[in-house]
Image (tube, rainbow, N blue to C red):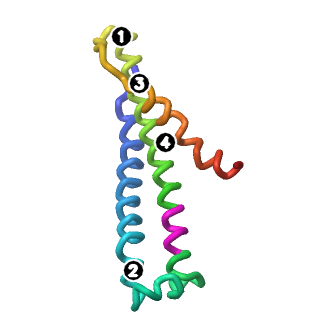
Amino acid sequence: YISHEIRTPLNTVHLGLQVLLEEMTDLVDTQLYQLASDVSQFNDADSGFGISLSELKLKLEEWTQFISGIDESTEDAITVVSDLLDFDKASNGMLSLERGIHNMYSLIHDTIKPFEIQAKSKN
């Protein structure tokens, strides 16, 4: 018998990544512009990190995409654990199956998306 508690740490990571993504999105979308005294000077304004605000914005957007990929993989791991739990239920005769309609394009897209960053880095 597999414990349902195996999902708890994964859900915690998933929720933590969601909060981090929200904060980073807010930082990229609003707070960086507030650092520049003149929005027209944004591209050349110093971030305080040795790069311009526009370069910092690009880096943060890159990290946001990276963290989003990790979050999607975490969601996939939660799905796998849930499937294992369902299999455990089925093997113990405690699971009923339902028919449903599935979007094959979405399923394939979600399957290959975690490999997108790695593939882009290799051209």
Which residue in the structure is indicated by mark 1?
A: 92
Which residue in the structure is indicated by mark 2?
A: 33
Which residue in the structure is indicated by mark 3?
A: 83
Residue at disc 3, secondary structure: helix
Q: Distance between the residues labelled 4 and 3?
A: 15 Å
Mark 4 vs 3, N-terminal side:
4
11 to the left or right of 66: left
Per the rendering, the mark at residue 16 is: none
> On the rendered image, what quadrant is the N terminus found in?
top left
Q: How far apart are marks 2 and 4 (CA)?
A: 31 Å
Q: Nearer the viewer, residue 92 or 21?
A: 21
Identify the residue shown where x is 51% and y is 77%. 54
Closer to viewer: mark 1 or mark 4:
4
Quadrant in which residue 25 is drawn: bottom left
> What is the three-letter code of the residue carrying label 4?
Ser
Where is residue 77 shown, x and y percent of the image? 46, 36
Residue at disc 1, secondary structure: loop
Where is residue 51 shown, x and y percent of the image? 58, 81
Quadrant in which residue 97 is drawn: top left
> What is the three-letter code of the residue carrying label 1?
Asn
Which residue in the structure is indicated by mark 4?
A: 73
105 to the left or right of 62: left
Residue at disc 4, secondary structure: helix
**Above or below: residue 38 compared with residue 76:** below
Q: Does the magenta stretch include residue 60?
A: yes
Residue situated furthest top in the rendering: 93
Local crowd at mark 1 within 10 Å, few (<14), some, or many (≥20)? Answer: few
> What is the three-letter code of the residue carrying label 2?
Tyr
> What is the three-letter code of the residue carrying label 3?
Asp
Mark 3 vs 2, N-terminal side:
2
Q: Give yes or no for contact between labels 1 and 4 (Cβ–Cβ under 8 Å).
A: no
